[in-house]
Amino acid sequence: PDGYMVKVVGDTSKTADQYYVKYDLKQKVWKETVGWNVSIGLDYVTMPWTLVRAADGNFDLGYHDWKDRRAGDDDTNPQPSMVGSTITDVFFFRNRLGFISGENIVMSRTSRYFEFYPPSVANYTDDDPLDVAVSHNRVSVLKYAVSFAEELLLWSDEAQFVLSANGVLSAKTAQLDLTTQFDVSDRARPYGIGRNIYYASPRSSFTSIMRYYAVQDVSSVKNAEDMTAHVPNYVPNGVYSINGSGTENFACVLTKGAPSKVFIYKFLYMDENIRQQSWSHWDFGDGVEV
């Protein structure tokens, strides 16, 4: 009969090769489906909102219809690790939408940004979603994801990890490795300018603004240097925003420690070497918070 379900079992000692099919009377075929009493999808109320451009040129902000689970059960097609946890960052990499949650990164199917379940558990493909955890001897709760030199840098308070893949990014080729261990403020998102990423590293009363970069001719090796080393008591603690421009060669920093000021770092690189650099600030006066 139409809608009749069957559980197909391979090796009885394993659950990984089990799947479910449902009979479609109209097409006279068996189609893969989800198991009995299995949650079919994500709760859109607790998922991030989306900003969608409508046909009339306006933008609609609101809940989104995330694709349901269409095959398997909680053993063969488990919920993404972000379910029941907090999403701390949203990113886009290698044509996949991604979320950071705890020590995991969760990425959608390739070009299908709202699908976080494989469409089949009988046949896995390279464009299936990714769900990967960092590996470190200390707890490393991830805070930010920043694209850098064809890789994805993942930032925790005390360590940095890099997501890479040889060729197509898939569950089989994805590598998530520890690359450096620098202290990073979790209040200010690291910001990429040109071939560098700038981030804040707080000290006792002041903050160092660091430049994170790939070592010349050895892109797999990363390092960082303090761009406030010559003015260590200039930027107060409480940095919450870093922005800038590679065209105008500057970075601007906002901090709760000096709410009326915008700190400006100007630089000039020639042949991969820094030729000029300076720090200054704009002060908008007492009682003004930028």
Image: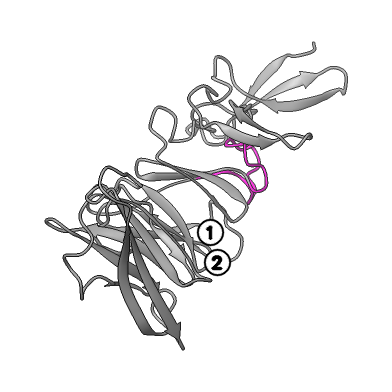
Question: In terms of secondary structure, where does tag 1 sit?
Answer: loop
**Magenta part of the chain:** 110-130
Residue beneath the point at 31% across and 63% down: 281
Residue at position x 57%, y 37% in the image: 116
Question: Residue farthest to the bottom?
Answer: 271
Task: Please tell me which residue is depicted at 87% across the width and 23% down the height of the picture.
Answer: 27
The answer to whether residue 45 of the structure is visible from this angle is yes
Q: Amino acid at mark 1?
A: Thr
Identify the residue position indicated by label 1 in the image: 173
Q: Which residue is mark 2?
A: 166
Residue 125 position, x and y percent, is 65, 48
Marks 2 & 1, CB-CB < 8 Å contact: yes
Whether residue 244 sits left or right of residue 93 in the image: it is left
User: Principal SS element in the magenta part?
Assistant: loop
User: Looking at the image, which is closer to me, 162 or 63?
Assistant: 63
Residue 217 vertical position relative to residue 40 in the rendered view, above or below: below
Q: Horizontal and vertical percent for residue 226?
A: 26, 71
Q: Tally the numbered discs.
A: 2
